[in-house]
Image: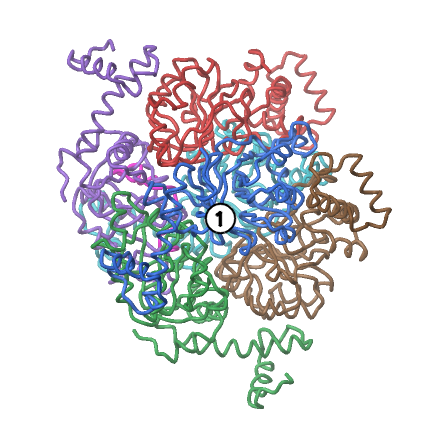
Chain colours: A green, B brown, C blue, D cyan, E purple, F red
Amino acid sequence: MTVSDETLEKLRQVSTPTLTTQLLVSFGLTNVSLRNVLPVDVEMARFAGPAYTLRYMPVREDLRPAQHLNHPDNLMTPAVETMPAGSVMVMDANGRNDVGTLGGNILMRLKVRGIAAAVTDGGMRDIPEIEGLGMPVCCTAAAAPPSFTKLMLADIQCPIACGGVPIFPGDIIVGDSEGTVAIPAAFAEAVADGGLAQDHIEGWVNRKLESGAVMPGLYPPDDDARAEYEAWVKAGEPDNV
Amino acid sequence: MTVSDETLEKLRQVSTPTLTTQLLVSFGLTNVSLRNVLPVDVEMARFAGPAYTLRYMPVREDLRPAQHLNHPDNLMTPAVETMPAGSVMVMDANGRNDVGTLGGNILMRLKVRGIAAAVTDGGMRDIPEIEGLGMPVCCTAAAAPPSFTKLMLADIQCPIACGGVPIFPGDIIVGDSEGTVAIPAAFAEAVADGGLAQDHIEGWVNRKLESGAVMPGLYPPDDDARAEYEAWVKAGEPDNV
Amino acid sequence: MTVSDETLEKLRQVSTPTLTTQLLVSFGLTNVSLRNVLPVDVEMARFAGPAYTLRYMPVREDLRPAQHLNHPDNLMTPAVETMPAGSVMVMDANGRNDVGTLGGNILMRLKVRGIAAAVTDGGMRDIPEIEGLGMPVCCTAAAAPPSFTKLMLADIQCPIACGGVPIFPGDIIVGDSEGTVAIPAAFAEAVADGGLAQDHIEGWVNRKLESGAVMPGLYPPDDDARAEYEAWVKAGEPDNV
Amino acid sequence: MTVSDETLEKLRQVSTPTLTTQLLVSFGLTNVSLRNVLPVDVEMARFAGPAYTLRYMPVREDLRPAQHLNHPDNLMTPAVETMPAGSVMVMDANGRNDVGTLGGNILMRLKVRGIAAAVTDGGMRDIPEIEGLGMPVCCTAAAAPPSFTKLMLADIQCPIACGGVPIFPGDIIVGDSEGTVAIPAAFAEAVADGGLAQDHIEGWVNRKLESGAVMPGLYPPDDDARAEYEAWVKAGEPDNV
Amino acid sequence: MTVSDETLEKLRQVSTPTLTTQLLVSFGLTNVSLRNVLPVDVEMARFAGPAYTLRYMPVREDLRPAQHLNHPDNLMTPAVETMPAGSVMVMDANGRNDVGTLGGNILMRLKVRGIAAAVTDGGMRDIPEIEGLGMPVCCTAAAAPPSFTKLMLADIQCPIACGGVPIFPGDIIVGDSEGTVAIPAAFAEAVADGGLAQDHIEGWVNRKLESGAVMPGLYPPDDDARAEYEAWVKAGEPDNV
Amino acid sequence: MTVSDETLEKLRQVSTPTLTTQLLVSFGLTNVSLRNVLPVDVEMARFAGPAYTLRYMPVREDLRPAQHLNHPDNLMTPAVETMPAGSVMVMDANGRNDVGTLGGNILMRLKVRGIAAAVTDGGMRDIPEIEGLGMPVCCTAAAAPPSFTKLMLADIQCPIACGGVPIFPGDIIVGDSEGTVAIPAAFAEAVADGGLAQDHIEGWVNRKLESGAVMPGLYPPDDDARAEYEAWVKAGEPDNV
């Protein structure tokens, strides 16, 4: 199932906390935010796109040669060269934050190929290069060692877990400075619309609270508060809430 | 027992490492620094005030509705609206750093109400809003999901553990850029005075070391060093140590 | 065995991810990067020098007095006063990130004595002082409590584990903004030379990728790519790759 | 709310795996089985009764004297002497399996007082005495040290977490050789009846499978299988399934 | 690649510690023993057979219905009904020891179908039934809750990790009372032969040690000891070593 | 310092829970019971003797050859052949329960040499052989892989941590079916005498409780109870308490 560019653009405007609330309240999902997976550079953190998944598993020493990128059985190079532009590359690195899943050279190629972001629940190498890359990269830690010290690539475009969250190829992955969230493609449009609405009214609530309003009735808004909000919207959202 | 404003003001001038030394050396307490509980914004990290405690426990799915802030049994809204100005709100979030204990709207209300700081051993949501809030907020992680994905509020103003440290309502909670410390109210004045004295002499020691003095005799200061320090203080603390 | 200043200087120019690759590919070592041991100040993070090791163990309450720096049995003061200038002080703090291994005063003395860096797999105290110190300090966390709340110093200049990595006195410890790596002294020269070569060609590869080159054949470079690289080097490394 | 003796007796006949299935399928509860909390003696493991709760927290060294059973502020002795016969004593020991929550003497008093079982998510002391006690005792480990090395008793008859499961006073706690389960009192009767029915039909299924029947249609039973089962029951449950 | 019945039979006679030594010494593999995966019944623990793999991942709440065995998309029932007799069913349960991967009914069907053993790095349900089943079952814990409280089945017959060990379909899985080991099929024959030889000479060494022989020269055996052993074998392995 | 055989014999008669109470109450030690270190065979679990310590650290791949017992630098063989009869061999295996610290052959040699027990905070191999060995062996798990897959022996007869407890060579190590405890040699006699006295009066208390006595005044015994106990002792400890 394809999610429209319009929905992706909306999702890029909704905060990840709001997305998790929408997924819980509207769809009953409690496990959608990738644990400890945060952007290397908080200024380069906003993205949304369909997941292209890679699955690692613990390395077996005699299979380490196949992890070298020039080995004929290596899965990484074809993945990097063929995944569609706009994809979010999501790697199940088994939560190993003591190895770097990718480094500067592969990330540069991904950026040039138009990949929306690279996400792993392991570490990342070459942090200084990532900071200048111009593509969002999310991970759990800086980690110098190459991935094949501990991991090998097992499969691509299969269901994975990343940061403890189940992710299917094509799920929409959204990131911002405080988190990374997976949204089943079928729910993406509803979550985008619900999220924008929630963020907007909560922004109004926040300004009311800043002005000294009490929480009961206002947050969460009861019918009266909601009517006041709608009147404020209709009035063109004046500065004075 | 009430701790004076003067003592609180002194405590805001003592570093948290020094407070832990005082509590160990003078009172035998080894477990006073909340593990991994650090300020979201290191520029907005200094505070001291009496603990107002909230205790969470794992959520039971059928009780999730009562976690909504507008539910008649919800404990959060009355706590937020009634805790005394100057309090430090301390939450036992069971160390769950994969959920956000509070978000921007409640934190705004707490700030307006004059709460000194909000402290949790779980995550916090809406980090960008917290960075502009103007109230210290301490937590273990950025975490997008709402608390009720995993937790429910069980009780208020009871003894809790936060970051592995036992905390009673009224304990004095002090924070700075490198930690959050709980001080039993009965010990607060002695710790404040002892801490100021320790920081002052250690500052003098540091300048002596910077000038090339050797450690033995100086750090920790023996009687001679202490006499030299006192003379320096009496002399008006000249630049030349 | 002594490692030359020239080799140390080369090691300071190689990134820690590259060092781990060299140690794996050339010497089969998979466990050389200290887990979670990162510089307090990423701007003051580059160093290389021989390890001077200290080993902590869990404190026994009746032996806590001997942890005070002025106790005749204390091992810290003589270590601080006698370790050779240029050493990297490496502490096996048993991975306890809830105590501060060292604080500002000892660190000042180490800096004055010409120590290259202080490294621990525990916490560090007095982070603001460390940020102004002018000596690299690497640890796993900010932690206010003094080390002797939980640890005692057991031994010096013996083999230790730090961040899960085996370290012998005299191993070369290299740090940068994204990691801390231990290199057996006997391998240091080969790793330094191999690392510089690797970084150089990977820099060229990165510029090729940035210009739109595809990965196969280029990364890792096959014979043709390597010949092109060598020609580029011979041509004086022109801007146009 | 009171649960009838008849329901308690039924619950003692249902296996804990079946109870967890009933609580999930009928009430949507996923978190009801106390992690790692197992009977010391698998031959003395079956019990059901209402929870009488105790909550521990990390000890503060200066409050350790109040943990001694003869201290006037101690909460344990009055709890032991007054909790109703038939209760299951459930202790939130913060999951500390390195201390023994209770030992032989208190357990003997509980047994004489008619307590149904003692349950903790910490360790237990005096395992050999427990093995001869004649009362079910469930814990996570054998642990020699007294509880007050690490813990202090904070409260009684409040909501707690034990083994990661939320438990309210009066919840029905059921144990057998492979687990310990908490059932909200309001759900106990339905769970008991549903569980007995499930165990009975699954016993029939198992005998069919043992005789060579294939799984599809039989497990879980479709309408035809269910009809066959009912006919078998009506026929007096003959040996030949 | 197929491993002969003769090799499987030899593997059933070699202890799992010896198998790990063989895999390290002859093939350089350090990660072959499934962590914490032990037989429910140590009397029913010896098995060897090719792995038939299943991979779980964290459950997504809206996909829980497909985990029911009668759902058309469910992967378990076809796997159970079609995996070849003699297979060892190996489940990557993500190390979740708080849920039971399988229970009595499915295990009964597997036993009737001639499966050699069922292995998981999660928990197992219905332990009393397993103890009477007559088929080896290996897991990390007794756990009452059904798997779909936390997990969903993602894939079958793909490479997995179980107990931290990489396992491919067709790898030979060998179990005994103290462990569960995965052997790449290509190495099985050499490991079987090497293991039988190692166990035999170590048995002789043990009897020598029991008689008072010293370790140097004997364990590990030097050339003289090896000659003495060979003479003893040639002599018909007399009681007197 | 030497502990007398008489004291060792007394210590073998005191339960490990009682020893931990004595060490806390009389000497303020809270960390004396080795976490998770339990006897392989609960019927062969009672021992007391002075610690002979060995310290492991993470293996470095190029040093693995020196771990082979016949390597000239190997530390294990001389330790095994020279440690005094009656010693308890205590190994700091870094808490790695996924490798076996020792196996059947070395343990046989230790037994023949009169070693009192072998204790590790790692795993042990060859569990079936250990069960028939006739010497107490304490560990945290059954683990098939040889130690040198992950560890190397770093030092002998130095201070170590085992199961999180600080242990010096010569500390008295006492084991029983529910634990393993380290006692500083200087405290051994007082702990032995205090422990015997405590066990005796608690035995009397238990019989009083079994007869229906209430806890207050009796446990812990107040002056009246203590007088009654002493009268009972003087009367020859009649059956009727």
User: How far across and how far down the image is residue F63, in percent?
Assistant: 37, 32
Residue at 24%, 20% in the rendered image: E201
Please tell me whether residue C45 is drawn above or below residue A201 in the rendered image. above
- The 10 Å Cα crowd at callout 1, few under 14, some 14 to 19, many 20 or more, is many
Any magenta on residue E146?
A: yes
Question: Residue A95: where, in percent of width, then height?
Answer: 40, 52
Please give left or right for residue E208 compared with residue F30 in the image. left
Position in image of residue F201 (x %, y %): 63, 21
Q: Is residue A177 above or below residue B159?
A: below
The quadrant of the rendering that contains the C terminus of chain A is bottom right
- When the figure is inspected, residue A190 is found, relative to residue E26, above or below; the finding is below
- Whether residue D180 is visible here, answered yes or no, is no
Image location (x, y in percent) of residue B92: 60, 54
B223 relative to F194 in the view: left or right = right
Residue D79, quarter of the rendered image: top right
Say which residue label 1 marks: C175
Quadrant containing the N terminus of chain A in the rendered view: bottom left
Q: Which amino acid does label 1 sit on?
A: Gly
Residue at the extreme front:
C235
Magenta range? E128-150
Q: Which chain carries label 1?
A: C
Vertical placement of residue D115 versus F217, above or below: below
Q: Residue at x 23, y 22 (%)?
A: E200
